[in-house]
């Protein structure tokens, strides 16, 4: 069960499983208003999305890889429900990191450059593994591509791209629950 | 069930519920080696900590408040298990924030200044509520105090301070599972 319906210029109704949320929309540059998906602070919505995404995890997946911050509780729940381990790329260098993999995000929707950091001991857990990339929302796909590069550089193979929502024209072979409008 | 035992200079064994982890230690400045607690990427350890913390949530708590990033899956699980909503302060301004509360962290272990951001619509959910502050590790207590200030500025009341681990000499009335050495 699920669906997306536009309420007005300031809200978008989204249903995942038996949870319905009215996503607020926020003004982003000249693009117009963009719906805002927040898994952080909403365990019921997170759980509904994880439950719906569970059967979509590509067969043969051995590890999940995500990136901070909004997808974090979602990846935790997917890991818990699937029994697969998950790893997390950061957007800042942490002082404790050892020989991290550093990956630039190739293109950014908002023209802001971003760098992903994957701590060395965590990168080691992707080696020779089939890794599915998990995200909350995929827009341009730039972050997904950077995560895929991290998987390859760590010696793993990308098993697939899984997101709760697609929002844009990414050419990735993305598996997702629902499509959100880019702007309303 | 639980306990902490030092293995050698590079690892510390910690048991929470029926989950045992050998925490790596990392060199921090001149302090020596500090044990590193990672809930991110470890759903079993996160769940064990949440289950053990559940009965420690102060009576009368109406909302949980945490801060990114490591405590995020823990707060999600505590929220899920307790049925209490949770809110999350960020460490960076997000473009979509509306009238956020901005709070400096008064003192920092590593001498690095930090600022917490709580989005306006989320701050509104703390108003007139009894709020328990949830963290992964409390060291100096500076972040906990900044979170408490956010609660007060949002019109709420602090019901208590709950952490998985205490690691230092904070004077806060902290409820926690286990104490970790500050350095080994």
Image (spheres, coloured by chain):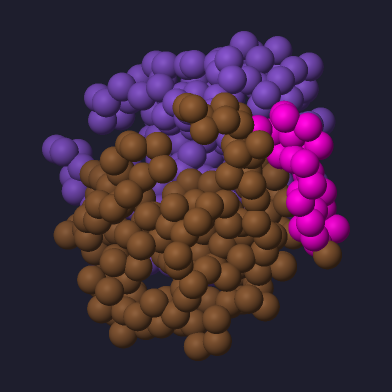
Chain colours: A brown, B purple
Residue drawn at 66 percent across, 73 percent down: A54
| Residue at 49 percent of width and 20 percent of height | B146
Is A104 placed above or below A29 here? below
Measured as percent of width and height from the top left, residue B76 is found at: 64, 49
Tag count: 0
Instruction: Find out whether residue B141 is within the magenta segment.
Output: no
- Whether B52 is drawn above or below B67: the answer is below
Relative to residue B46, is residue B59 drawn left or right?
right
Residue A163 at x, y = what percent?
56, 62
Which residue is situated farthest in the left direction here?
Answer: B30
Find residue B120 and report its horizontal and vertical position in percent. Answer: 63, 20
Locate residue B18: give its quadrant.
Answer: bottom right
Which quarter of the figure has residue A47?
bottom right
Could you tell whether B140 is left or right of B111 in the image?
right
Residue at horizontal 76 percent and vertical 51 percent from the top: A4
Taking depth in this image into account, of A99 and B9 the one nearest to the observer is A99
Q: Residue at x 54, y 47 (%)?
A: A70
In depth, the one of A76 and A28 nearer the eye is A28
Left or right relative to A140: residue B10: left
> In the image, is residue B53 above or below residue B133?
below
Residue B167 spot, x, y in % from top left: 40, 40
Is any atom of residue A74 visible in this view? no
Question: What quarter of the picture does the N terminus of chain B occupy?
Answer: bottom right
Q: Is residue A95 left or right of residue B49?
A: left
Please state the extent of the stretch shown in magenta in the rendering.
A2-25
Give the overall secondary structure of the magenta segment.
strand
Nearer-the-camera pick, B28 or B39 = B39
Determine if residue A41 is in view: yes
| Residue B142 falls in image quadrant | top left
């Amino acid at each position: 069960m699920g669906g997306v319906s536009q309420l007005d210029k300031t809200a978008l109704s989204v249903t995942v499983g038996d949870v319905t949320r009215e996503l607020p929309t926020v003004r982003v540059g000249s693009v117009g208003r963009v719906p805002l998906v927040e898994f952080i602070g909403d365990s019921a919505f997170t759980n509904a999305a994880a439950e719906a995404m569970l059967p979509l995890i590509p067969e043969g997946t051995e590890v999940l890889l995500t990136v901070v911050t909004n997808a974090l509780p979602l990846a935790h729940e997917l890991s818990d429900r699937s029994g697969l381990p998950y790893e997390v790329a950061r957007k800042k260098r942490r002082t404790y990191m050892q020989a991290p993999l550093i990956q630039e995000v190739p293109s950014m929707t908002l023209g802001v450059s971003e760098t992903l950091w994957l701590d060395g001991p965590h990168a080691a857990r992707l080696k020779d593994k089939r890794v599915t990339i998990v995200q909350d929302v995929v827009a341009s796909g730039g972050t997904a591509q950077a995560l895929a590069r991290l998987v390859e550089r760590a010696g793993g193979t990308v098993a697939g791209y899984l997101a709760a929502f697609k929002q844009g024209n990414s050419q990735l072979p993305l598996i997702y629950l629902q499509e959100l409008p880019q702007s309303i």
